[in-house]
Image (spheres, rainbow, N blue to C red):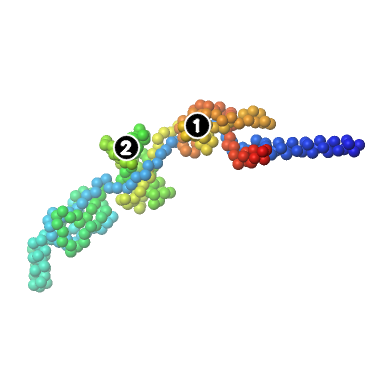
């Protein structure tokens, strides 16, 4: 009776031992995540850093050398074509007005009415972006008193490998690096015909007109442009994190095979299509019913170490 009891206890302990071994090494313990192919609408985008700049920056200079009498605009002010932006005294007028002032107030006012200052006007519609001189300064005809812009745009340099995704009239999304959460739309208005060689890469300048400028839109700001390269509706895809790419560009996934009690894991090469970073289309190498997994390497390694 005692031998039978000991045998039963021994068998029970042995069963318990195998149960512990099975639970410890169960595949559920080493599967970190799993997924299947699902149809998704994917959009492939790429981002290019650029900057806010003037489409045309125009210096406003005096037609005559002399002294600046009065500046009527400040930075940021809008101006119309032909609007007077500052008044100039020629060298001769400045000398005569100064001499009259030294005589008397009446003499000064009389010559002010006789010898009028020269008006300088804005050459086109736009806004003032820089005020370089102040009233009272003597300047030559070569010196700019003001600089104006007809419009502010965003320019980016596109790598020649991405050139096929660029087309005049396409809409893009942008944001200023100073305000990364505030997106605004733009339209591609010009693509350069002449390439530039920057950092050993051939690039083309692309000009983008904002459809609605942010309030704090300033020349010189860094702007990031998001360009849609491709899109596809209902693409059979999985999360990109499940795909491994080796140094040769070979893409693989880990597929769970076998039955529920004794599953196996197979590393399989797949061909991918469009990717939205978060999700990637699987063109071939995987069936919709198959389960793709990510194995928890830490638990797997601990199990292997325990066996040794």
- Residue 58 in the image: x percent, y percent? 22, 49
Specify which label sits upstream in the sequence, 2 or 1. Answer: 2
Tell me the residue at 41%/49% (across/down).
Answer: 180
Give the class, few, some or many, for how many residues have Cα within 10 Å of label 1's Cα (few <14, many ≥20).
Answer: some
What's the mark number on residue 251? 1
Could you tell me which secondary element the residue under label 1 belongs to?
Answer: strand
User: Is the C-beta separation of discs 2 and 1 under 8 Å?
Assistant: no
Tell me the residue at 36%/34% (across/down).
Answer: 161
Left or right? Give the position of 304 relative to 167: right
Is the N terminus in the top left, top right, bottom left or bottom right quadrant?
top right
Tell me the residue at 52%/34% (across/down).
Answer: 243
Is the C terminus in the top left, top right, bottom left or bottom right quadrant?
top right
In front: 196, or 47? 196
- Report which residue position mark 2 lands on: 202
Mark 2–mark 1 distance (CA, rounded to whole Å): 29 Å
What's the mark number on residue 29? none
In front: 116, or 241? 241
């Amino acid at each position: 009776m005692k031998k039978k009891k000991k045998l039963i206890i021994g068998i029970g302990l042995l069963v318990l031992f195998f149960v512990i071994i099975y639970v410890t090494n169960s595949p559920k313990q080493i599967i970190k995540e799993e997924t299947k192919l699902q149809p998704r609408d994917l959009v492939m985008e790429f981002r290019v850093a650029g900057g806010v700049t003037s489409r045309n920056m125009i210096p406003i200079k005096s037609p005559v050398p002399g002294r600046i009498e009065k500046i009527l605009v400040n930075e940021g002010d809008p101006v119309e074509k032909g609007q007077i932006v500052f008044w100039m005294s020629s060298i001769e007028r400045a000398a005569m007005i100064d001499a009259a002032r030294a005589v008397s107030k009446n003499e000064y006012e009389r010559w002010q009415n006789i010898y009028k200052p020269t008006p300088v006007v804005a050459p086109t519609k736009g806004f003032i972006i820089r005020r370089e001189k102040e009233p009272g300064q003597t300047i030559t005809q070569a010196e700019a008193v003001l600089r104006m812009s007809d419009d502010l745009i965003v320019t980016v340099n596109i790598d020649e490998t991405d050139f096929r995704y660029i087309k005049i009239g396409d809409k893009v999304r942008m944001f200023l690096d100073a305000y990364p959460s505030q997106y605004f739309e733009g339209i591609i208005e010009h693509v350069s015909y002449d390439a530039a060689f920057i950092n050993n890469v051939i690039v083309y300048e692309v000009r983008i007109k904002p459809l609605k400028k942010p309030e704090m839109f300033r020349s010189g700001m860094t702007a990031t442009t998001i360009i849609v390269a491709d899109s596809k509706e209902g693409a059979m895809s999985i999360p990109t994190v499940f795909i491994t790419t080796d140094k040769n560009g070979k893409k693989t996934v880990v597929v769970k095979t076998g039955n529920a009690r004794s599953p196996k894991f197979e590393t399989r090469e797949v061909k991918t299509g469009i990717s939205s970073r978060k999700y990637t289309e699987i063109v071939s190498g995987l069936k919709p019913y198959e389960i793709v997994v990510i194995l928890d390497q830490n638990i797997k390694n601990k199990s292997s170490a325990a066996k040794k």
